Structures are given as C-alpha cells and as structure tokens.
Image: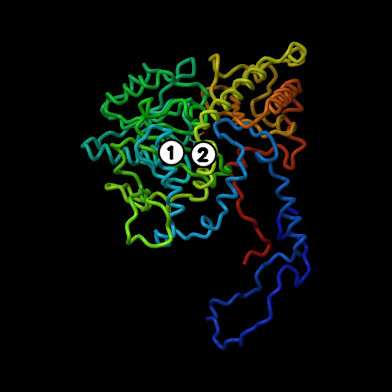
C-alpha cells in the first residue's frame, strides 16, 4: 500500500459525527455547489492511520536516522529545545495581523535575530523576509540593482560568478535580468584574480561568490577580489551557504562584501530538506539598506500609548525602508524557522565560534582518514579516488573525485553514492561543484562523533572494494532501488491518479 486511499477500508469507518444539537435549517446550498458524489475519504480506524503514517516515516532517511554528509547542504542536528520554543502558544497562536501590542514577544525575537545576524556577518541591516537562500540571493541582487539605478549607474547589466558557484547564484541574477559572466577557477580551485580582472568593467553590477568556496577552500585573496570589483564600481555579494565554516572567526563584511544571505536552515539548525521550510535572511551594508524589503523590525522606547501588559523599556515596531523594493514574501518571513534559529543561537551564544571550529575539525579529520586508509585496507581497494583539491586543510567540507575509478573500472561517483546507501548512509552530494570531475562533496557537520566518522570512513572503504557490477546495481537494500535519475527529474509525477478522477 503506497497510499492511504489504497487501503481497503470498511464502510462507515474513519469518521464519526456528533448528533445534531440544533434544528436542521431550511436553507439550502445552491445546486451548483452541491457534491455529486460523497467525498473520497479513506475508511480507516485510528490504529490503521497511525500504522500507515508510521510505516511511511520508516521509508525515509533523515538526519535523525543516520549520518547525512550532504556537502554544501549542512544537514545538522536540530536540538529539540528549538521545537519546544517554536511550539509555545505565544508563538504558534499568533496571527500576523494582530495588533503590534500582541506581537511584542515575537517582534523582539525577530529584532534580536536581525541584530545578531548583522553582527556575525559584519553588515549594517538585516531583513528576515526571504524564505530560502536562493530567494535571499534574488532579494539582495534586486537591492543592488536599485542601488545602481539610484546613483545613475542603472546601465550596469552583468553579474560575475566563478565556475564553482552554486546554480542558484546565476539563476537569481538572471531572474533580475542580468547577464551572467562565468569565470574559470584556477588550478588550485580558487578564484583566478587575472580572470576576474579581465571581465570587470563599467558594466559590472556585482560579483557573487561563497567563501569558503564550494570545494571547501577558503578564498584567501577575497579582499583583493573585492577591491577589483569595487574599483570597477560593482558590488560584492556573499553566498552564505558555507557560513558554518567561519562563524565567529571572520565576517563577509571584513572580506569586503556589500550584501550577504544567510541560510538559517543550514547554519543555525532548523529542519531542512526537500526545498523547505527554510529561511534566507539577507544582510547589507548601509548604502543598500534603504532598498530592503519590508517589514523590518525596529525598536524604540515604549510610550504611554503603546498598550498594556508589556514589560520592559523597548517597544518593537514594523518599519518599511525608504526606497524598499517591496515585499518578497508574505508577512514577516518564515517565523517558525526564525524562532528555531533564534533558540539555537541563544543557546550557543559566543560559543558559535566553537561550532565552526568543530565543523572544520570534523571535515579535516574525515578527509584525512578517508583519503589515507591503512595498508591492510588500501591493499584491498583497487583504485582510490583522489582529493578534489590540493590544499593541506579544508574548511567545513571537502570534495573527492572518483575519476580514477571511472577510468579504470567504470565506477562513477553516482555508483559510490548508491553503494553508500546500501551501507545505511545518506549519500554525499554528487556532481557538484562541476569543476571537480566525478565529484563527491562531503560535509560531516560539527555534531558528529569521532566514532561516527570512523565508521563512515570504514564503510566508504568497503564500498571502494566492491566490484563494478555490484555498484552499478546498488542500492539493493533500500525501499526503492536504482531509479532512472533523468526520468525522475524530467517526468515528475506529483499527484495521485485515481481511477475515477471526477
Ligand atoms: C553554495 C550554495 N548557495 C546557495 C544555495 C541555495 O540555498 P537554498 O537551498 O536555501 O535556496 C545552496 C543550497 O544548497 C548552496 O549550497
């Protein structure tokens, strides 16, 4: 049974209605609005419903079921205290249209979140509106666009991205109407400053880049890149997807960036996956602040007309920046996500720095043991993958390339990923970034223990000893075997077709 509607139920089961306590009304609904058939309700008893959904939940792999080293996606443990706080009635029972005096608690959380995010990115103003990193990119690039127009530079029509950029960077800029200029990375996987110099000009609107970059390497010449872009009149945009590596250590502001998005659902915990629910606030330097979407949260001293029942000196208010680009999302953004992330940061406080340290330590440890099996294991592995970058140390994630295996025995990165599923792991990110051939991108995050990393490495080595036929057919232990990836991506079936559809 893949679907609750396929359950062979018993007539009359599944719902009960209380006896009518009022007199039946003579008023009739218009005929056109009446159902022609009874609603198609599943006919199950309560235990059957519970069993169905519990069964469904066991078919999923999640961060709560096992190690989830999905590079660039920072699938981190979500402390349960976040859930307790986000589920408090003072949060869940609010309606965004309630009076400001009813919203003071939530507004104060949002204000604090704006302030904290501004500090940790070295920015001047933050809006919590966007609900995904990609939406944050779009929003910030729109602000940059309006800024250029406001200073008579509206002709700037090009956005530069390195070839290692996440696909959302060029996509967001293109949605704002910009032409995308891609520049190649150097052999070391880092930004090539000469390539950058050759494309900047008086048509450059911005450059978008993440740091550490998508290979997990810190762009140590980033402030030189910022100088090059700024001296041509462009703006620097920081893709914050890799913030987990640098929190408390440095800031995009110090590196020379003008705007940044935060993937709250990565860096600050919060359940994440399947495209949502997320939160992608943006932070900007002061010259861009007047264009941010509204509402933003501000505070002032409370006065006697502000209403009763609220303690404290501050009064939190929704404000609209002067030349706002308008709204990019309803209400105040994804408030549930924001509260969870606020709870997370409140618990860590100044130890956020430790979080990044542990994330980087775990990535370096795993990289080392994966790439350096002991002699006994190495003798059983016909071909080792190679390190995707030549740096001594990575940041919070690293890449490896399965190219040598592919050339020798036809085993691809995808085959290794599927083999790992059979060992009980979520596969790392594959084929991204595109600059590493047969790429696997691994990000362990800060909360995994040494034992988990050791076991993962030994299972990975086991996969490497397997023959190509086994790996081409993997996975065989999961609920769904090897799927046709292209068909699955191009021919999405998102709704259930009932035999009788009317
Ligand atoms: C480097 C990078 N940039 C941007 C994004 C987009 O973020 P979101 O998925 O929140 O839209 C991602 C997502 O994985 C990413 O890895």
Q: Is residue 380 above or below residue 350?
A: above
Image quarter hosting the N terminus: bottom right
In this picture, residue 420 sits left or right of residue 308: right
Say what secondary structure mark 1 lies in: helix
Give the distance between the C-alpha atoms of the residues marked 1 and 2, in whole angstroms: 9 Å
Q: Quadrant of residue 36?
A: bottom right
Q: Quadrant of residue 392?
A: top right
Which residue is pictured at 64% across the width and 56% down the height? Answer: 496
In this picture, residue 437 sits left or right of residue 225: right
- In the picture of the structure, the residue carrying the numbered disc 2 is 345
Which residue is pictured at 53% across the width and 24% down the height? Answer: 216
Q: Residues within 10 Å of mark 2 (few under 14, many from 20)?
A: many
Q: What scheme was used to colour the molecule?
A: rainbow
Which residue is pictured at 48% across the width and 21% down the height? Answer: 218
Residue 49 image offset from top left, x and y in percent: 73, 59
Residue 443 versus residue 123: which sits nearer the camera?
123
Q: Which mark is residue 184?
A: none
- Mark 1, ligand 1, within 8 Å: the answer is no
Residue 96 versus residue 28: which sits nearer the camera?
96
Residue 208 image offset from top left, x and y in percent: 40, 30
> Count of labels shown?
2
Q: Is residue 7 above or below residue 136?
A: below
Marks 1 & 2, CB-CB < 8 Å contact: yes
Q: Residues within 10 Å of mark 1 (few under 14, many from 20)?
A: some
Image quarter hosting the C terminus: bottom right
Q: Residue furthest left?
A: 152
Q: Is residue 502 above or below residue 315?
A: below
Residue 83 versus residue 101: which sits nearer the camera?
101
Q: Which mark is residue 116?
A: 1
Looking at marks 1 and 2 on the same chain, the residue that comes earlier in the sequence is marked by 1
């Amino acid at each position: 049974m893949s679907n609750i509607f396929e359950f062979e139920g018993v007539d009359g089961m599944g719902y009960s209605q209380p006896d009518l306590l009022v007199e039946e009304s003579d008023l009739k609904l218009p005929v056109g609005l009446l159902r022609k058939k009874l609603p198609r309700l599943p006919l199950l008893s309560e235990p059957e419903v519970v069993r169905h959904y519990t069964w469904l939940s066991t078919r999923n792999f999640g961060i709560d079921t096992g190690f989830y080293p999905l590079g660039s996606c920072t699938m981190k443990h979500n402390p349960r205290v976040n859930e307790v706080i986000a589920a408090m009635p003072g949060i869940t029972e609010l309606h965004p249209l309630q009076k400001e005096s009813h919203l003071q608690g939530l507004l104060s959380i949002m204000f604090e979140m704006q302030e904290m995010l501004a500090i940790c990115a070295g920015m001047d103003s933050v809006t919590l509106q966007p609900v995904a990193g990609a939406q944050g990119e779009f929003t910030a690039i729109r602000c940059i666009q309006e800024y250029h127009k406001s200073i008579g530079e509206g002709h700037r029509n090009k956005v530069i991205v390195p070839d290692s950029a996440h696909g959302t960077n060029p996509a967001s800029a293109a949605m704002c109407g910009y032409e995308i200029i891609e520049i190649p990375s150097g052999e070391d996987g880092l930004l090539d400053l000469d390539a950058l110099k050759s494309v900047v000009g008086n048509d450059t609107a911005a450059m978008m880049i993440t740091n550490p970059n998508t290979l997990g390497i810190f762009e140590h010449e980033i402030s030189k890149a910022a100088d090059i872009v700024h001296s041509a009149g462009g703006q620097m945009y920081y893709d914050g997807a890799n913030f987990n590596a640098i929190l408390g250590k440095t800031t995009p502001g110090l590196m020379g960036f003008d705007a940044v998005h935060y993937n709250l659902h990565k860096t600050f915990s919060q359940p994440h996956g399947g495209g949502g629910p997320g939160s992608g606030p943006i932070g900007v330097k002061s010259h861009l602040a007047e264009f941010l979407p509204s509402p933003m949260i501000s505070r002032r001293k409370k006065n006697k007309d502000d209403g009763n029942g609220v303690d404290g000196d501050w009064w939190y208010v929704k404000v609209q920046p002067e030349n706002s680009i308008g709204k990019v999302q309803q209400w105040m953004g994804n408030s549930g996500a924001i509260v969870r992330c606020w709870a997370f940061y409140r618990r860590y406080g100044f130890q956020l720095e430790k979080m990044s340290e542990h994330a980087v330590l775990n990535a370096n440890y795993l990289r080392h043991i994966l790439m350096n099996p002991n002699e006994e294991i190495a003798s059983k592995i016909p071909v080792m993958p190679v390190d995707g970058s030549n740096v001594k140390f990575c940041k919070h994630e690293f890449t490896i390339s399965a190219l040598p295996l592919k050339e020798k025995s036809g085993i691809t990165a995808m085959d290794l990923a599927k083999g790992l599923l059979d060992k009980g792991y979520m596969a790392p990110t594959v084929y991204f970034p595109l600059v590493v051939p047969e790429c696997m991108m691994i990000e362990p995050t800060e909360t995994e223990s040494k034992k988990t990393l050791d076991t993962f490495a030994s299972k990975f080595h086991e996969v490497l000893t397997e023959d190509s036929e086994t790996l081409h057919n993997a996975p065989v232990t999961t609920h769904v075997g090897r799927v046709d990836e292209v068909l699955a991506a191009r021919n999405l079936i998102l709704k259930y077709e009932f035999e009788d559809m009317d």
